[in-house]
């Protein structure tokens, strides 16, 4: 494969997101011999530290600094990358809020293919790249071929690749001058801090998380009793917040909180990528779901195909007995 691989790095407060390290592994899964460059857009000292934070995972890091890039505005980043990327580039980005915003427009402007929400890379076959996506809420895997002739923009789902500890001494190259005139019609105004709830789910080592499978607000006590028995905190998926059964500060996911527990017990959660996207740090996942084909079982370390309304109270009783 002749093309070079570029990886868009998402970062916050001067540190690269976990996805940056997962994408380094994904790039190698495409072609272990290809050159891989991290693209870090931003401004000021936060940009410098973000570049440093990925220089241990990428042999080459392009630092692209501009006041217009201080906030991750996909429109401004797209404008910058069009001035910087070579023809036929293969661009990887996380399938997160920024990547979903950036990817489609970037691929159209580059005249390349766009493949969102990739969960697996099967490798090259001639000039085709074989990829796996999930459809129908993760119940079906789709194997596709992507023609790389004109390059590609590929969004990788969070958690699909395990970050590896193979440190390199990356070179940081300042490409700020090449960014050109950045024009964006969409302007950043302010960040509004999320509401703070009575508990901080990001600090707990063990989470008992409830999804729509809990069926009724009254049944949340079933999860709370299990959480109390094992010293955990109750978190939830988005439908539970939408139904106003629990407060927003307990929601795990791309539009909720990012959590890094050691153990994650998912009760009646299907395992959508928006939910799993909030789960970082490779926790030990226990999933209880009455549908044996629920996508969460693909991520779970222990999968229990049971009705949670019957199984969880019994489990809690047994734990109390053991104590
Ligand atoms: C832009 C956007 C952002 C989003 N952000 C988030 C986010 O941050 N967090 C989030 O969670 N979602 C988010 N979502 C929603 C997401 O797409 C899913 O709809 C949601 O995660 C599904 O929640 P769930 O798994 O609880 O419900 P469902 O998908 O309805 O799954 C319920 C599961 O419970 C099981 N079940 C039912 N009854 C029982 C029982 N008695 N015992 C055992 N199992 C049972 C079912 O088999 C099913 O698998 C977002 C969506 C969009 C479009």
Image (spheres, rainbow, N blue to C red):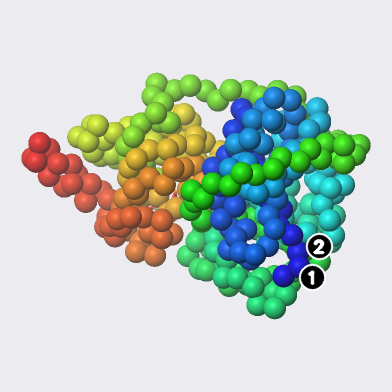
Please name whichever residue, 226 or 157, is drawn nearer the observer in this view of the structure: 157
Please name whichever residue, 25 or 106, is drawn nearer the observer in this view of the structure: 25
Q: Is mark 1 within 8 Å of ligand 1?
A: no
Residue pictured at 34% horizontal, 48% vertical: 284
Secondary element under disc 1, as helix, strand or loop, is: loop
N-term-proximal mark, 2 vs 1: 2
For residue 78, which quarter of the picture? Answer: top right
Q: Position of residue 249 (x, y in %)?
A: 46, 29
Name the residue tied to disc 1. 149
Can residue 20 be seen here?
Answer: no
Outermost residue on the right side: it is: 181
Can residue 66 be seen here?
Answer: yes
Name the residue tied to disc 2. 88
Secondary element under disc 2, as helix, strand or loop, is: loop
For residue 232, which quarter of the picture? Answer: top left
Look at the image and tell me in which quarter the N terminus lies: bottom right
Direction from residue 144 to residue 299 in the image, left or right: left
Mark 1 burial class by Cα count in 10 Å: few <14, some 14-19, many 20+: some
Mark 2 burial class by Cα count in 10 Å: few <14, some 14-19, many 20+: some
Direction from residue 32 to residue 45 in the image, left or right: right
Q: Position of residue 254 (x, y in %)?
A: 55, 41
Q: Are marks 2 and 1 in contact (CB under 8 Å)?
A: yes
Direction from residue 49 to residue 258 in the image, left or right: left
């Amino acid at each position: 494969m002749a093309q070079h691989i570029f990886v868009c790095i998402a970062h916050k407060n001067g540190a690269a997101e976990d996805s940056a390290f997962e994408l380094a592994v994904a790039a190698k899964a495409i072609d272990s011999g290809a050159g891989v460059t991290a693209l870090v857009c931003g401004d000021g000292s936060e940009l410098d530290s973000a570049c440093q934070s990925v220089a241990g995972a990428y042999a080459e890091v392009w630092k692209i600094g501009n006041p217009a890039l201080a906030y991750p505005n996909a429109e401004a980043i797209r404008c910058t990358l069009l001035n910087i990327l070579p023809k036929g580039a293969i661009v990887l980005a996380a399938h997160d809020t920024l990547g979903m915003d950036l990817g489609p427009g970037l691929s159209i402007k580059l005249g390349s293919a766009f493949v969102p929400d990739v969960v697996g890379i099967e490798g090259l076959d001639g000039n085709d790249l074989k990829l796996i996506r999930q459809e129908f809420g993760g119940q079906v895997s789709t194997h596709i071929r992507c023609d790389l002739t004109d390059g590609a923009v590929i969004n990788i789902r969070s958690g699909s690749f395990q970050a590896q500890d193979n440190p390199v001494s990356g070179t940081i190259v300042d490409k700020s001058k090449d960014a050109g005139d950045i024009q964006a019609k969409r302007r950043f105004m302010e960040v509004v801090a999320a509401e703070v709830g009575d508990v901080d789910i990001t600090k707990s080592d063990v989470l008992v998380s409830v999804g729509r499978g809990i069926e009724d607000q009254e049944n949340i006590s079933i999860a709370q009793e299990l959480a109390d028995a094992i010293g955990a905190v109750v978190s939830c998926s988005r439908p539970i917040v939408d139904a106003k059964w629990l407060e927003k500060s307990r929601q795990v996911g791309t539009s909720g909180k990012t959590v890094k527990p050691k153990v994650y017990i998912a009760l009646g959660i299907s395992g959508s990528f928006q939910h799993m996207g909030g789960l970082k740090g490779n926790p030990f996942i226990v999933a209880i779901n009455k549908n044996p084909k629920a996508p969460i079982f693909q991520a779970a370390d222990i999968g229990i195909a049971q009705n949670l309304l019957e199984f969880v109270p019994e489990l809690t009783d047994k734990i109390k007995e053991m104590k």
